[in-house]
Amino acid sequence: MQRVAFMTLGCKTNQYDAEYMREQFLRAGYAPVDFDEIADVYVVNTCMVTATGERKSLKYVRQAARRNPQADIVVAGCVAQHEGEKLALPGVRLIVGNARRREVVPLLERARREGRALCAVEDLTSAPFEPLDVLANEGHTRAVMKIQEGCDNRCAYCIIPEVRGPIRSRSLSDVAAEARALGQAGYREVVLTGIHLASYGRDFRDGTTLLDAIEAVCAAQGVERVRLGSLEPAWIDGPYAQRMARSEKLCPQFHLSLQSGCDRVLGAMRRRYTTAQFRRAVQSLRESFPGCAVTTDVITGFPGETEAEFQETMDFCREIGFARLHVFPYSERPGTPAADFPGAVPVSEREARARRLIALGRETEGAYVRSLLGRAVEVLIEEEETGYSREYVRVRVPGAREGEIVRAAVEDVQGQTAVGRPLA
């Protein structure tokens, strides 16, 4: 029996794509092994949202070639989509980007028969949504479901529209069908993800929106919790949040991408909102979901960002009180407008600002976790005695078992982890 090993970098959408390909290899009779073991096939699902992600992707390709020089390497994902035939490195047998993943096994077999490296990267300009049904979600108690692909925003710093293509949405009937299958398979929580999740349905032109997808998944028997991936703040207003709140299974944790707390920098980034709009979006969510967790992403050291403008971001993040902050030093992406912007911030300063913001994020996260003291929370246990609440706070519940959803009274906080007492 041939062995296959996977290495996946990047976002939840990438994880979903990789899980689909892994299931295809297993159905074809391959045995899964860890990436640091000897395998006959290594699949590296790459990420290039930052230079670090791209470097790591190529590092794992080279590692696989050294680990077993006789192995066939499949390079997939965003770096593969962008670089194409340039990735025909030693050991690489198949290059497949962000399309044709349904064919990954037969494409590899064809490349083996022909005794050459096969580049199966497709132009995504008019590509349809590629439905990839995932049911195993190996090693997870939560299931990720991709319902949307691509982005039309073209922010100044972002290469993703080039490597993921324009927005495409999964049909609402397919979304409902996979949700039912996941519920029947025993998954209690489903995480909806996409490259620009809030734009779900816009390409249908029939009025379908993300709200319809949320309601379809919430209706699936067996699914008890539905969580959303990243949202754009410009899409959230009072009526939108109120309709979301009617879906009782929807988890009160919302990831709104900020990127900067300075309006001038947001304009330079070509983001489609202001800090005032962001603030109103958070207010709408908190009015409809009292006590909800709001998490975010921030980029430090964007070209032209001054120390005073960075301080605006610090002040804004402190004001909002994010439950979690994901911080990234700005990374030049060749081919994006920002790569040619004047006023480059030294890398050391980008990283120093990131460290300061990360420290603030630990403070605001700790404050949010402490706000749960004395409250009853519902926890999905993902490993022995530990899991996540509906607000996506890590909670330890002594005596709880993996896969259970338990109610617990939060009685202590240790760092960013709450400690709960099981409730009957």
Image: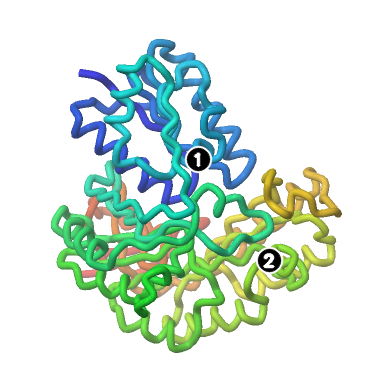
Q: Say which quarter of the image contains residue 83.
A: top right
At label 1, the amino acid type is Gln
Q: Is residue 329 visible?
A: no
Under circle 1, the secondary element is helix
60 over 402 or under it: above or below? above
Q: Is residue 34 visible?
A: yes
Number of numbered tags placed on the structure image: 2
Near-viewer residue (324 or 386): 324
158 over 265 or under it: above or below? above
Marks 2 and 1, how far apart at CA = 24 Å
Rendered location of residue 111, percent (x, y) = 35, 22
Q: Quadrant of the C terminus?
A: bottom left
Near-viewer residue (272 or 186): 272
The residue to which callout 2 is attached is 270
Q: Residue shown at 36%/84% (left/top)? A: 243
Please state if 114 lies on the left or on the right of 31 as rendered: right
Under circle 2, the secondary element is loop
Rendered location of residue 212, percent (x, y) = 31, 75
Q: Residue shown at 43%/44% (left/top)? A: 98
Q: Say which quarter of the image contains residue 258.
A: bottom right
Q: Say which quarter of the image contains residue 169.
A: bottom left
Q: Residue shown at 50%/20% (left/top)? A: 63
Please tell me whether mark 2 or mark 1 is closer to you in this view. Answer: 1
Q: Quadrant of the N terminus?
A: top left
Q: Residue shown at 53%/65% (left/top)? A: 295
52 over 266 or under it: above or below? above
The residue to which callout 1 is attached is 81
Rendered location of residue 25, percent (x, y) = 26, 32
Q: Earlier in the sequence, mark 2 or mark 1?
A: 1
Near-viewer residue (237 or 360): 237
Rendered location of residue 107, percent (x, y) = 32, 30
Which numbered circle lies on residue 297?
none
